[in-house]
Amino acid sequence: MKIIDFYASDDQNHWLSEINKSDWRAGKYLYELLRDQKLKDLCGESTKALLLIDGDKLISFCTYAEQDDVREPSLTPWVGFVYTFPEYRGKRRVGKLLEYVYMLAKNDRHKHIYISTGETGLYEKYGYQFWKIMKDAHGEDSRVYKTDIVSMDYRDVLGTTVSGTIDRPLGSAHPRHPEMIYPINYGYVDGVFAEDGAEQDVYVFGTDQPLESYTGKVIAVYHRLNDNEDKWIVSLSGETIQTEYILEAISFQEQYFMGELYTL
């Protein structure tokens, strides 16, 4: 899976066709706006139409825009047209799009991200909180959600040496989801407790063999944006590991969450 911007795609006709397959009135409207080249006129010149794709299949889509159907210039940016195709629902795939939007907004130095919706109980799963009722462009009430963009400080953790227990060794199955096989050793730091009240979880890099215990250096922290659990990344040798490699290695579990990686 990967995320692309419709406007940067070399095959816009194909992705237009895929968007048009959505069983959602707003999805059809997005298709028309893109087809007629009117989306940026409505939402701002910097608007992106983000597509989560798997090969030539469209999984989810959304927009990242200056404005949305609540026309309040002081509030920006907005996520809009959020949709996942039925066959991909239940795996929080749209969370990967919202995670990507979060990174875009953070790079653009925004403090908050907003969503206007009629849904209740959906965006809370992705770290958004109901903010207030506002009028949309048609004068109707809309529920506005927002999430804060944060910068975490892990200076007291990064670079430290920790020891602990591996309770889910490489090659073992998740205790509640046996279809999930751990491709990396996963455990906790003995005697160090996290926000959830349990001992601090770690992903341990540096061996292709299952472990029972470990000692290593914390080289990164994966901060979940929609959960209260951080995951420490431990290197047995203490050597730095490329960000892309870490994210790929932990994606078997973290694909179901939103997060960002803090490194030394």
Image: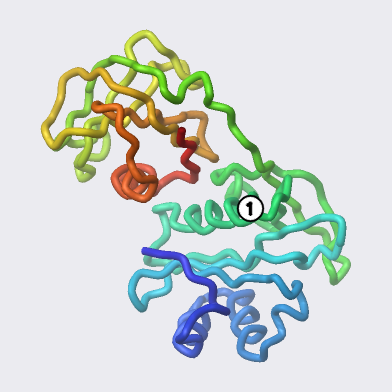
Residue 91: x %, y % from top left? 39, 53
Residue 54: x %, y % from top left? 35, 69
In the displayed structure, 249 sits above or below 135; it is above
- Residue 30 versus residue 104: which sits nearer the camera? 104
Residue placed farthest to the top in the image?
A: 191
Whether residue 59 sits left or right of residue 144 in the image: it is left
Image-quadrant location for residue 93:
bottom left
Image-quadrant location for residue 139:
bottom right
Q: Residue at x 18, y 29 (%)?
A: 169
Whether residue 65 sits left or right of residue 188 in the image: it is right
In the displayed structure, 181 sits above or below 35; it is above
Q: Amino acid at mark 1?
A: Asn
Mark 1 lies on residue? 107
- Residue 139 versus residue 45: which sits nearer the camera? 45
| Quadrant the N terminus occupies | bottom left
Residue 96: x %, y % from top left? 47, 55
In the displayed structure, 244 sits above or below 11; it is above
- Residue 215 versus residue 29: which sits nearer the camera? 215
Residue placed farthest to the front in the image?
A: 239
Q: Residues within 10 Å of mark 1 (few under 14, many from 20)?
A: few
Q: Residue at x 46, y 33 (%)?
A: 264
Q: Residue at x 58, y 66 (%)?
A: 62
**How is the model colour-coded?**
rainbow
